[in-house]
Amino acid sequence: MHLGRIKGTVVATMVAEGLEGVRLLIVQPLNRELKPKGGMIVAADALKMAAPEDLIYFVASREAALAMEETFVPVDHAIVGIVDELHWSTGEAVE
């Protein structure tokens, strides 16, 4: 699983079968310090509730396809959780 922050939405007039009604969101992957890590990606919102600027965690590859309501749809990334709070091994809370 990877951390990311929602930065926007994607509007698609045509989608692959099985992705009808699935929101596609732009995600900035983050490192352990919550700093941007690489370029932005598009992720399917398996939760159906992620919002702009939410801190989320997502999965990639086969796990992304399995996370969707209809499994094995053509997605590379899927949002599977919204982060409320982080605790690193130092015991320090990050919000």
Image: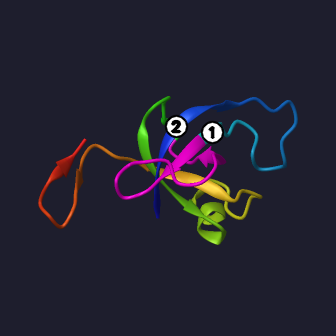
Q: Callout 1 environment at 10 Å: few (<14), some (14 to 19), or many (20+)? A: some
Circles 2 and 1: CB distance less than 8 Å?
yes
> What amino acid is at disc 2?
Ile
In the displayed structure image, the side of residue 36 where residue 70 appears, left or right: right
In the displayed structure image, the side of residue 41 where residue 7 appears, left or right: left
Q: Quick one: quadrant of the C terminus?
A: top left
Residue 71 position, x and y percent, is: 67, 62
**What residue lies at 45% left-to-right and 31% top-to-bottom?**
53
Could you tell me which secondary element the residue under label 1 belongs to? strand
Rendered image quadrant of residue 11: top right
The magenta span reads 27-47
In the displayed structure image, the side of residue 78 where residue 19 appears, left or right: right
In the image shown, does 83 or 36 lie closer to the viewer? 36
> What amino acid is at disc 1?
Ile
Q: How many marks?
A: 2
Could you tell me which secondary element the residue under label 2 belongs to? strand
Residue 47 position, x and y percent, is: 50, 44
**What residue lies at 65% left-to-right and 48% top-to-bottom?**
41
In the image shown, does 32 or 58 lie closer to the viewer? 32
For the residues marked 2 and 1, what is the alpha-carbon distance in whole angstroms? Answer: 6 Å
Which dot marks residue 6? 2
**Which residue is identified by label 1?**
26
